[in-house]
Image (cartoon, rainbow, N blue to C red):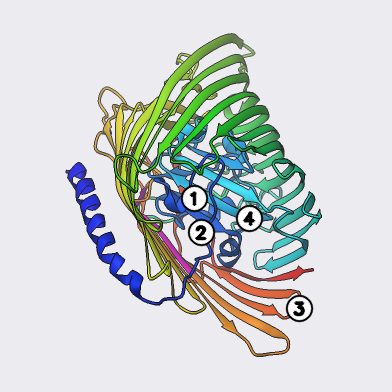
Amino acid sequence: MYKYLVAFLIIFLIHVSAKAGEIDTLHVKQVDLEEVVVRSFKQNKSFRNTPISVSSISNLNIQRKNITDIKDFSATIPNLFLPDYGSKLTSPVYIRGIGSKTNAPGVGLYVDGVPYFERATFDFDFNDVDRIDVLRGPQGTLYGKNSLGGIINVYTKSPFKYVGTNINLSAGNYGNIQAAMSHYGNVNQVFGYSVSANYRHTNGYFTNVNPDPTASDKVDKANSASERIRLSWRITPRLDLHLVSNIDYSMQGGYPYAPYDEQGNWGPINYNDYSSYERFMSTNGFTVDYKGEHFFLNSQTSYQYFDDSQRIDQDFTPASIYFTNQTQKQHMFSEEVNVKSPGNTMYKWLFGLFASFQKINREVAMNYMQKDSITDKFYKVPAFNLAFYHQSTFDDLLVDHLSLSAGIRYDIEQVRTRFNFYSDAHDRVSTTMDEKRSRTFSQITPKISLQYNFTPERMIYGTVTKGYNAGGFNTSFLLNEDPAFDPESSWNYEAGAKLAFLNNRIRTEISLFYIDWKNQQVTQVIPGLGNRINNAGKSTSKGVEASLQSEPFRNFNLQISYGFTHATFKEYNKTDKISYAGNYLPYVPSHTFSAHGDYTIDMHSSFLRRLILSAQYTGAGRIYWNEANTASQSYYGVLNGKVSFVTHRFVTFDVWIKNATDTTYDAYYFESGGLKLAQRGKPLTFGANLALNF
């Protein structure tokens, strides 16, 4: 049935595009909407004319939507969902139902070309961000690891594009304070430099009622700070060098989990041991860009280090039952080289090589206080990855305006683990274990797409792509279990269109997708130990995505997006007697919806230049929280707003509000040791910003 819908969509879009051509004769002002951006290096064409479902958000829209971190993007983009987990340790990202909250992410993140492979690195404060691209659907052919669901590319500001000094101060209720400074400069557009720093504090939103003075404060209070240095050289008109170095530190309390009953009522947060999460992260990237007459070359060398510590009252009760302390250290090196055609010919090509080494040392110490038992586990998990890939694009194939793009990638990855276990029980009988294991995975991931351009601004496309995530080893498992889990793979079938009307005053995108998913890596909770990965049999995800961007009249911008996902297990036997076949996948909203509008009022004043009114509504749901589908969050919506006063000189003053209707909803839910626990979404918050631009 779904294949017939895809075929119908293509026929319908051809008809609509042909009719739309009649509008071209009207004398309408050409409009270039703000969120349209240029291509990335791996794309031979602009995103506007590429057979990929992609959403791009510019720096201006980041400001007007008051986006301060990656979780603020949840539901603002079709079928993108980021549950607000209790700490930065885990930042699950789901696109079209694909994601992971325990193992390596199912959605990849790159910042200035540097890959963020570990889930504990995803949640960072946004500062000096120029634009963000979200590519939906498997991107394994060009990006490989962790791109089964899609890719998020974050680009920071270039000193060749921005010049000057910016100071931003923000304050709000619940003790929300943020201060940021950045400076950009260049010498004759040959040598550019920038430095930025950011500090953020919150008193927290939720209180632990436990009388223990170490745990009675706000459980989610947090402090974070970061700095970034960027140096850019234009050695010659053809050769550019870029060096980016970033340091990020955060310290937060945790976790705001409260007992939760079947009627959807929260109990008080009440546990006796103070919990926290602390992280230090350093990310560095060196980029070489060379534009020759016959080829372009891009080289990206990167290194990322992080060191974190999680302390958690694992039982979340006033009793002293479990307490766990987990520490991690990661070293990640990567090198990627791309060579592609200049892009001005009918045949375009790209070759790439990627190599990485990632090593994580993890220690998990659990104190089982009721039995006077202590267990200490040590894990060393090195992983080696090597990939070769190619993509060719043929324009005007057979007939004018018809393009064919085909790509293929070969990945090989070796994952090793060394596991040391020590247990000391109350009877002083100790247990030790020392194991070494290794697994090697390899996969070929092809992609083929066909697109037809009616005009430079109107095209339809169809794409077939294979997605893949390697297997690995669990760091939480029972001693009589095999800690390994298998790879997962998917085939993604997609048809869509990108259309513009009224000389680009209105732009729309629509796509249908169907994902056939095998050996899905699912998360299971082991009480007192944590989470482990298991493989389900088969799953499917199908849905639709649509977006509209327009300027219906002068100074008013409107953006609307909608996503529908129907993601279910086809085959999944939890035990011999329990089957979840037909159940919805957890953490996947059936609907995501976003509507944003901003209106600029030109002021005829010697002091005030512009008044900008912005409002945004985002909604998501229904969301099932477990594989059994016994707990869920119905559809809910959050309303945000912002008013900006822009002066004639260098001052901008904003007042903002988030969750203006104080909507109550579940942001996260899980079950552990017979307990049902949930985290509420953030309540109504408001504040003001002051920006100075010199």
Q: Quadrant of residue 281?
A: top right
Real-space CA distance between mark 4 and mark 1, rounded to the nearest whole angstrom: 17 Å
Real-space CA distance between mark 1 and mark 2, rounded to the nearest whole angstrom: 9 Å
Residue that mark 4 sits on: 130
Residue that mark 2 sits on: 36
- The residue mark sitting in front, 1 or 2, is 1
Residue that mark 3 sits on: 649
**Amino acid type of disc 2?**
Val
**Amino acid type of disc 4?**
Asp
Real-space CA distance between mark 2 and mark 4, rounded to the nearest whole angstrom: 12 Å
- Is residue 319 magenta-colored? no
User: Closer to the N terminus: mark 4 or mark 3?
Assistant: 4
Q: Quadrant of residue 415?
A: top right
Q: Quadrant of residue 403?
A: top left
User: Closer to the N terminus: mark 2 or mark 4?
Assistant: 2
Residues at discs 3 and 2 in contact (Cβ within 8 Å):
no
**Amino acid type of disc 3?**
Arg
Real-space CA distance between mark 3 and mark 2, rounded to the nearest whole angstrom: 28 Å
Q: Which class describes the residues within 10 Å of circle 3: few (<14), some (14-19), or many (20+)?
A: few
Res 212 label: none
- Region in magenta: 616-623
User: Closer to the N terminus: mark 4 or mark 1?
Assistant: 1
305 lies above or below 475: below
User: Closer to the N terminus: mark 3 or mark 2?
Assistant: 2
Q: Is residue 528 visible?
A: no
Residue 460 position in % (x across, y down): 32, 51
Q: State left or right for residue 379 relative to residue 517.
A: right
Dominant SS type (magenta): strand
Res 46 label: 1
